[in-house]
Image: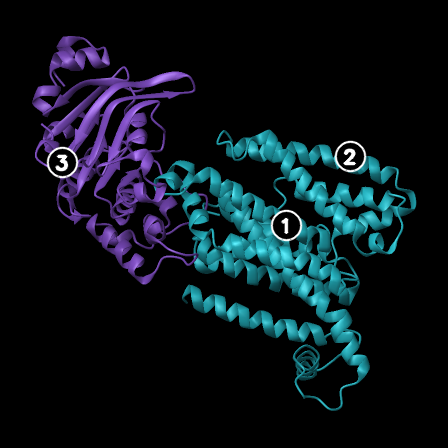
Amino acid sequence: MGVRRVTLLSLAALVLVAVGAIGFGVANIAPLDVVAIIGKSLLGLPIGGEISAGSTSIVMEIRLPRILAAIAVGAALATSGVAFQSLLRNPLADPYVLGTSSGAALGAAIAFLLPITGIAWELGGVQLAAFVGALASVALVWRIAGIGSGEERIASVLLVGYAVASLLAAALSLVMLASGANLRAIFGFLLGGLDGVTWPRLAAAAVPIALATLLLARRGRALAAFLLGDEGATHLGIDVRRERRIAVALATLATASAVALAGLVGFVGLVVPHLARLAVGSDPRAVFPLSAIGGALLLLLADTVARTIGVPVGVITALIGAPFLLWLLHRARAGYAL
Amino acid sequence: MSANDTAPYELLGAKNLQVDLGGTTILRDVSLSIGPGERVAIVGPNGAGKTTLMRALSGAVPATSGEIILCSEPIQNLSRETIARSIAVVSSDITLPFATRVDELVALGRIPHGRGPAGPSAHDRERATAAIERVGASHLQRRDVRTLSAGERQLAAVALGLAQETPILALDEPTAHLDLRHRMEIADLLISLAGDETIMKTKRTIVAIFHELDIVRDGFSRVILIANGTIAADGTPAEVLTAERISNAWGIPLERAARL
């Protein structure tokens, strides 16, 4: 199957699953009714006479923002994964490789403890703190490893990322020990979840995610050239330092926005790019769009399971992702090229 | 000696080139000119500056002083992309982080000709297939590059350079790690590629770094000997590869150099 065909088919699957997922829940709503409600509410189409106000409110106020959030977060994590795996030329890189997750976790944990009140803070204080924490940790790794100065080595970027993440994790543990009654809330953020996503929170994360992802897709030629390493990419006409800076910045923006909205959802960004490569080969220009769709689909399915059985979505992605990662590693050891 | 004397146009040249890396002078007083359709072998001991010369000629490292001319333009006036459409540099060890088919790898050579975010176009794929055919590697097309033997991998690397469709094809030790037969095959291929096609109104030019002097004597009309960061000799193999020069450059006894 051609790249375009696989991509279009998975897009169609995503739309179908999304409609199904919106209808699925304690109050089941038929897929056609879901389409009618969305068509009526968003586009003002004159359809559906006998749809209850209750169904409309469930779809429009609870399920639709949550499903869109799952799509945005899944797409952001998977495409950031493609970017970091390509830039670092490392199959085990994920969106959190530069310390995004630890920075976000520490930021959120501190926000839970701050004695700030007020409506604006209640609406998005924790999310904002997570976003800032994620950006700050990447900035720190960036400075220490010298990304963009041309002096960086991939191993040192990975090691610096690991060291900074460990330091932040230690700080997080201290904050958690001191957190008392907030421990449960912090723990919930660490597990990742999409409970209580509202339209304003969705918009605040989805707009930067969409922007970063689209701009990153436009750097596809550079990401492809990075397969051959810095020297090879240079000989293919790529300004390696500039492109790396742009790609790291965009992927970090997408990841930080995703983490602010959904907490630490693991494995999507690591596993989905590999699945996409199995389907369309290694060129990031083909892997990128398919990963966006695949990441959205995976997180949407995982979140539907999560809300049905009442556990954080991060637990589900880890339950699916970790065995898959082990399987990939097993194949890598057996001689299959990851 | 150089085709530049008759042509109004300078394909590739260096004037009083000096390159310092990390505070150490790697190359100094390098002046040369390479014309359309030439086959040029660069030889010299390890650490003499051969690879740095190739990197400087393709703009991958900046000149500390002096000048590099590519397609009659000072190289600093050219964009990275324009340089990549003029000179392809093939590394002797291509390592890939993910499973990648030979045709996918070779299609990466089309990147300097690409536009927009989409992957290789139908035309790009066609050019990649033609390049794979030209090196005689059609049977490897769908193999994972990482499972290829050293010789097969080298063919794929040459195809990658050809797909870039540049008037100059530069290769850094294309015969490294190859056995006798594969070494000969690659050398014959490179020799046949010189001047076989006209790209950007220029006959294809081959510049390659070698360690095997027999290959150079057999098929290359011009040899540049680099020793201690500068050009020790530049001319035909018979002129350059004398026992005395070999003995001096590599620091080996004259009587043994005479047998090489």
Q: Which residue is at 21% across, 47% downward?
A: B135
Q: Position of residue A91 (x, y in %)?
A: 52, 45
Residue B107, placed above or below residue A68: above
Viewer-proximal residue among A323 and B117: B117
Is the N terminus of chain B in the top left, top right, bottom left or bottom right quadrant?
top left
Whether labels 3 and 1 belong to a single chain: the reply is no
Disc number placed over residue A164 in the picture, else none: none
Of all chains in the rendering, the one displayed in cyan is A
- Left or right: residue A60 compared with residue B74: right
Q: Please state the chain letter of the residue tagged with numbered disc 2 in the rendered image.
A: A
Q: Please state the chain letter of the residue tagged with numbered disc 3 in the rendered image.
A: B
- Left or right: residue A24 compared with residue A120: left
Q: Which residue is at 28% across, 47% downward?
A: B164
Viewer-proximal residue among A103 and A306: A103
Label 2 element class: helix
Disc number placed over residue B38 in the picture, else none: 3
Q: Position of residue B250 (x, y in %)?
A: 23, 14
Residue to which mark 2 is pinned: A171
Disc number placed over residue A255 in the picture, else none: 1
Viewer-proximal residue among B136 and A328: B136
Whether labels 2 and 1 belong to a single chain: the reply is yes
Tell me where residue B92 sits by quadrant: top left
Q: Position of residue A134 (x, y in %)?
A: 68, 43
Of all chains in the rendering, the one displayed in purple is B
Q: Position of residue B56 (x, y in %)?
A: 31, 29
Q: Please state the chain letter of the residue tagged with numbered disc 1 in the rendered image.
A: A
Tell me the amino acid under the disc marked 1. Answer: Thr
Residue B172, placed above or below residue B252: below
User: Crowding near pointer 1: few (<14 within 10 Å), some, many (20+)?
Assistant: many
